[in-house]
Image (cartoon, helix red, strand yellow):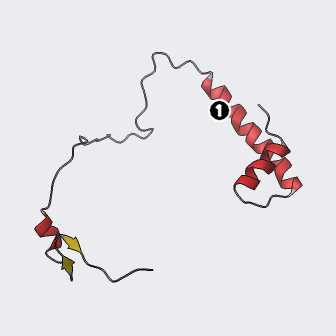
Amino acid sequence: MAIDEKVISNMAKLARLQVTQEEAVELGEQLTKVLNHFQQISQIDTQGVEPLVTPSEINFFARPDEAKKENSTEEMLANAPDKAGNLFKVPPVV
């Protein structure tokens, strides 16, 4: 898949970026190379390959994804300089 200057110019317009014609050509070539690399990677046969959690030799520790209620509302508001009911009261912000 090739990304040409016209595609880059449209993307720049949508992103409200100013890109010269030379930059559009160069960026198109770079993005085309990136997409080609991803296309090559997508063709690798990964059947039977265990997913990699981390590439380093450290032991991976994952805690359970559980919601905990660690502090009560009163504990969280205890050091608030000003409060309104169960809410922190702050100065108006623009």
Quadrant of the drawing holding the C terminus = bottom left
Q: Position of residue 83 (x, y in %)?
A: 20, 78
State the image quarter where residue 65 is shown: top left
Q: Position of residue 91 (x, y in %)?
A: 33, 83
Q: Nearer the viewer, residue 28 or 49?
A: 28
Can the viewer see residue 80?
no
Residue under the point 76% across and 55% down:
13
Residue under the point 12% across and 68% down:
75
> Residue placed farthest to the right in the image?
21
SS at badge 1: helix
Q: Position of residue 89 (x, y in %)?
A: 26, 78
Q: Nearer the viewer, residue 68 or 45?
A: 68
Of the residues shown, which amino acid type is indicated by label 1? Answer: Phe
In this picture, residue 36 sits left or right of residue 81 = right
Residue named by callout 1: 38
In this picture, residue 65 sits left or right of residue 40 = left
Neighbor class of circle 1 (other Cα within 10 Å; few <14, some 14-19, many 20+) is few
Does 45 appear above or below 20? above
Q: Nearer the viewer, residue 57 or 73?
A: 73
Residue under the point 70% across and 35% down:
35
Residue under the point 67% across and 26% down:
40
Does 43 appear above or below 62? above
